Amino acid sequence: MSKIKLYILILGHLAFWIVNYLYVTKGNLTWMGFDNDSGSLGVVYSYGMFFNAFLCYVQVFWLVPAFFIKRKKLKFWSYSLLLLLGITFVESYLDARVASHYNLLAPGTSLLLVTFAVSIQNLFFHILYSAFGFLYRFLFEYRNAERAKQELLKETHQTELKYLKAQLNPHFLFNGINSVYHLIGSNNTLAKDTLVQFSDLLRYQLYESSEAFIPLEKELDYVLQYIRLEAIRKGDDISLEHTINYEHASLKIAPLLLTPFIENAFKHISHHDEAEKNSIVIDIKESEQKIVLSVKNTTDTTVQQIAVGGVGLQNVQRRLALLYPKKHTLTITEKPTFYHVDLIIDISCKY
């Protein structure tokens, strides 16, 4: 807690007791024969308020944290009861003495009898203020525990996100090297060009995407470079259509969320002899601060199950759940001849 908040809290408590005291001692009130006209009510309420405050704060600063929170319930209830009874007796005896001093008692009235007579009302207020102190500290501890739980959960999510993001680099590296490997020998010039583009993409993953959220324009430029790289690698074996449009370039998005779906399409596309039967259609658009991704590729029945269980897709689905809970919808349609992914992410929130 900051010093400013602490000072405000202390002032708030002081204001409560001052207002409480002024309300009782400056108004036209009476209590058990004590009144403000004689001044007796101000006297008894001065030490009465002190006893109430003591019972309240002894719960806040000692009994609850030292015993109740630590599950020492027997000691907690024992000490609470002893304090209640002891302070009630002391205050009630003082009330009897003040009543005698202001001639509020009949001659010969026993002070001990008056003490027990007023103790019931005093006990009620003492229980009330003790309960207030107990609830105040208990709710304070509960809120701290919830805050600690949320911080732990946030830290766990951040650790998991770092782990998931770290998995992307080896996964991407493996696929990229494998692509270049298959071009070496058959088309060395293309292999060199592919390697240069692959190194640019890898540089983006390692350095430029280190932030938790980056400008949408930068991420979509990366996606476009990746599509072009895969188009070079696949060559004339496939039919490829892609469109990327956006309205708000400065919007922020978590990096490397879209590429795994596109990578999956290239990796598991069908292998028909006719190129037009091996089709990939990619459409990415941003409108009204929502990014909409549609990826559709033809596939073979034999590779369909492999596509579903890829490391990249499992990874990105988990990242989506952590980064955009209740702010994204992912629909995957599987058919014997095609595989279709529809993803919508609400990126309107400011980071």
Image (cartoon, rainbow, N blue to C red):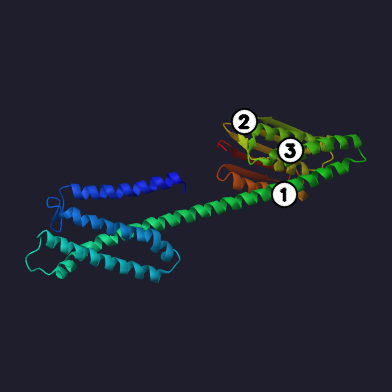
Quarter of the image where the C terminus is located: top right
The one of 122 and 344 positioned closer to us in this rendering: 122
C-alpha gap between disc 2 and disc 3: 18 Å
- Residue position marked by numbered label 1 in the rendering: 167
Query: Callout 1: 10 Å neighbours few (<14), some, many (20+)?
Result: some
Q: Which numbered dot is residue 249?
A: none
Q: Residue furthest right?
A: 185
Q: Note whether 177 is above or below 156 in the view shown.
A: above
Question: At 19% from the left edge and 47% from the top edge, which residue is drawn?
Answer: 26
Q: Is residue 159 left or right of residue 205?
A: left
What's the amino acid at mark 1?
Gln
Q: Say which label, 2 or 3, has the lower sequence index.
A: 3
Badge 2 marks a residue whose secondary structure is loop
Spot occupied by residue 178 in the image (x, y as percentages of width and height)? 83, 45
Q: For the residue carrying disc 2, how many other residues have a C-alpha within 10 Å: few (<14), some (14-19), or many (20+)? A: few
Disc 1 to disc 3, C-alpha distance: 15 Å
Q: Residue at x 40, y 58 (%)?
A: 138
Tell me the residue at 67%/37% (across/down).
294
Mark 2 / mark 1, whichever is N-terminal: 1
Q: Secondary structure at mark 3?
A: helix
Q: Nearer the viewer, mark 1 or mark 3?
A: 3
Q: Which mark is residue 204?
A: 3
x and y percentages locating residue 200 in the rendered image: 78, 36
Say above or below: 2 vs 32: above
Left or right, 292 with respect to 180, comes to left
Q: Quadrant of residue 282?
A: top right
Mark 2 lies on residue: 250
Residue 64, x across and y down, in percent: 40, 62
Q: Nearer the viewer, residue 95 or 187?
A: 95
**Seen in the image, is 123 located left or right of residue 308?**
left
The amino acid type found where label 3 is placed reads Tyr
